[in-house]
């Protein structure tokens, strides 16, 4: 357990390098403020496929393909793909990644998936099991609405606390070689459920789990929030973002100007009429793989804590009257090695 | 990559010990030939809960609780639970394991989940990230039928190739200390899809992926099939079992009397009218955690290769006319260290 820090964190002893990242984004995301940071823009929700689900699979395939291309790596040299998505049985990943012919380790962490896959992929490198691994996830507004809420044709009214599932897929190539940025720590989260039952208020459901993981990260590493140039959660949205700041304050940690949430960053919320902001695995994934990584690479950011936030509900559990448990996992990314 | 063997296999350098295992089984499973090897028998499908889904969550909680009790380990000393199940958004795991207050790394590998969670949990120990990890999965006949096929009340006729989803949950406590049995190798699988579209013939859909992983394991390790006292797949059933023997023969590997399938072992197929045998994550999980581990512990088996087999379909992909991709992961278990 030489790599263990405290209760929930591991510190990697090797330099686990992020060789390349790629982001595939939908139309609405390409109309937002981060547009110039995305590698591939979809012309519409179908993207040339018969079904939205197949479009989502194509998104993962394209994100991984572009990330490999940017890193100048052949798919056959990748040892593992860690992947997952929001679709039942993770069909976005399984159908999308099949053609690469690489061992696939499927992950389910709801919208925390990008951080979970990156953490596990980093473990695979640091542990000596792989020299090259890929982490990828996706979400698609149309597949998510159909599965979790109502058919789009129904035209349901959205509540003020509702978030908009981002259409996007982000992929990362991790390597035991390379000159960074590096994944240095992985803090894994516990399932936290404070009893929120409103499936249209995910931010409130996820904030307690996010605060739990964030506090664990600071306690385990001895770092204070201001160590980071940016602490960024995946998709708490405007509601969850204000809750987590309060919860962290109660726990004795002040997160302020260096904290933001991908769900608040990815859209121009008012102009694009996004209610409480963006959500979905793809929200954190493309904000990280596009915008944030660009800022790390150009020297604007040195130390970033990226935390994926997942609401672990299903339509079945909601219909059965259950509350919404949540989980958050975090990876620390540094431009330089300590 | 010092622990890498060939394309898909890792060999653990530490002794990753299986401290304890526990198996929770349903009624029908308790009427089968392996009954005496299960730790807990459910009196009915509801098991005192309002819904079958909550019963499945209780199964995972009980399996982990019993495994911890048998190993005399406090939940607070466990660093990670690797868990997954067949339910949409893996609610069997998330609702079931919440109370343990342990970091949860969710996994989706369909019915390959037990092998995937054990492989990842073994990596967490061997990699120096954890001294104690848990791997767990479950399936429940009633929740699976409702989600994947028809409401039970519909009384649909089963085809001859149909398998019966096992009601069961198996849990394993892995440790960096202990006197074995040991997990020595983990062979992770690629997604394989030969175009089978019949969701009532999972065995045929999964056999090619299973053969692919099995062949990779023998090639990577240099072991021949007869190294193992038992090679056991999770839930190919009678149809898949006969296909994989042929496929392996074509690949130049003879697997014969030392090969069996948990789906064929767990029920008295004719007497219990089980058509093509058992299936589901729980099928491999409780056969391994109950019967097979008992045989390893009492000295009957020394070297076992356990391969979880997963069909990566969803009702959505089936309704959209897609074929059934599959994946298989394998862990090698030895009573003694090499």
Image (tube, coloured by chain):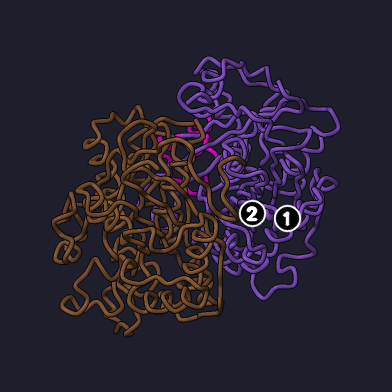
Chain colours: A purple, B brown
Q: Is residue B73 above or below residue A69?
A: above
* Nearest to N terminus: mark 2 or mark 1: 1
* Badge 2: residue crowd in 10 Å (few <14, some 14–19, many ≥20): many
Q: Is residue A218 magenta?
A: no
**Identity of the residue drawn at 27% across and 56% down:** B286
The boundaries of the magenta stretch are A190-210
Chain to which mark 2 belongs: A
Chain to which mark 1 belongs: A
Q: Is any part of residue B169 visible from this angle?
A: yes
Q: Position of residue B264 (x, y in %)?
A: 28, 71
Report the front residue among A211 and B305. Answer: B305
* Side (left or right) of B146 relative to A177: left
Q: Position of residue B127 (x, y in %)?
A: 51, 35
Residue A12 in which image quadrant: top right
Label 1 sits on a secondary structure element that is helix
* Badge 1: residue crowd in 10 Å (few <14, some 14–19, many ≥20): many
Q: CA distance from mark 2 to mark 1?
A: 9 Å
**Identity of the residue drawn at 46% across and 58% down:** B223
Task: Kindly identify which numbered label has been placed on residue B188.
Answer: none
Residue where numbered disc 1 is placed? A63
Report the front residue among A51 and B84. Answer: B84
State which mark lies toward you, 2 or 1. 1
Evaluate if marks 2 and 1 touch, with contact meaning CB atoms under 8 Å apart. yes
Report the front residue among A125 and A168. Answer: A125
Q: Position of residue A241 (x, y in %)?
A: 60, 32
Residue where numbered disc 2 is placed? A138
Q: Position of residue B305 (x, y in %)?
A: 38, 57
**Identity of the residue drawn at 77% across and 58% down:** A27
């Amino acid at each position: 357990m030489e790599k263990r820090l405290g209760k929930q964190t591991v510190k990697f002893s090797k330099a686990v390098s992020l060789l390349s990242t790629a982001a595939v984004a939908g139309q609405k995301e390409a109309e937002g403020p981060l547009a110039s940071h995305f590698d591939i823009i979809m012309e519409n929700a179908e993207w040339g496929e018969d079904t939205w689900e197949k479009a989502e699979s194509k998104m993962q395939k394209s994100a991984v393909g572009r990330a490999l291309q940017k890193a100048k790596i052949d798919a056959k040299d990748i040892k593992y793909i860690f992947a997952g998505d929001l679709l039942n049985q993770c069909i976005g990943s399984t159908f999308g990644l099949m053609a690469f012919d690489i061992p696939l380790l499927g992950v389910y962490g709801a919208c925390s998936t990008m951080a979970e896959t990156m953490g596990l992929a980093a473990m695979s490198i640091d542990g000596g099991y792989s020299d090259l691994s890929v982490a990828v996830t996706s979400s698609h507004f149309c597949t998510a609405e159909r599965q979790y809420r109502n058919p789009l044709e129904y035209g349901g009214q959205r509540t003020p606390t509702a978030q908009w599932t981002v259409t996007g897929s982000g992929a990362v190539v991790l390597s035991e070689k390379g000159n960074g940025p590096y994944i240095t720590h992985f803090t894994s989260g516990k399932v936290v459920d404070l009893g929120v039952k409103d499936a249209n208020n995910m931010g409130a459901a996820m904030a307690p789990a996010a605060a739990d993981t964030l506090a664990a990260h600071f306690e385990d590493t001895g770092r204070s929030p201001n160590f980071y140039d940016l602490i960024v959660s995946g998709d708490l949205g405007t509601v969850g973002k204000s809750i987590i700041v309060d919860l962290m304050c109660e726990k004795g940690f002040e997160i302020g100007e260096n904290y933001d949430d991908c769900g608040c960053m990815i859209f121009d919320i008012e102009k694009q009429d996004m209610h409480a902001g963006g959500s979905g695995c793809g929200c954190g994934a493309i904000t990280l793989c596009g915008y944030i990584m660009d800022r790390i690479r150009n020297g604007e950011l040195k130390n970033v804590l990226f935390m994926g936030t997942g609401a672990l509900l299903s339509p079945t559990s909601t219909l059965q009257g259950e509350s919404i448990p949540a989980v958050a996992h975090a990876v620390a990314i540094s431009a330089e090695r300590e």
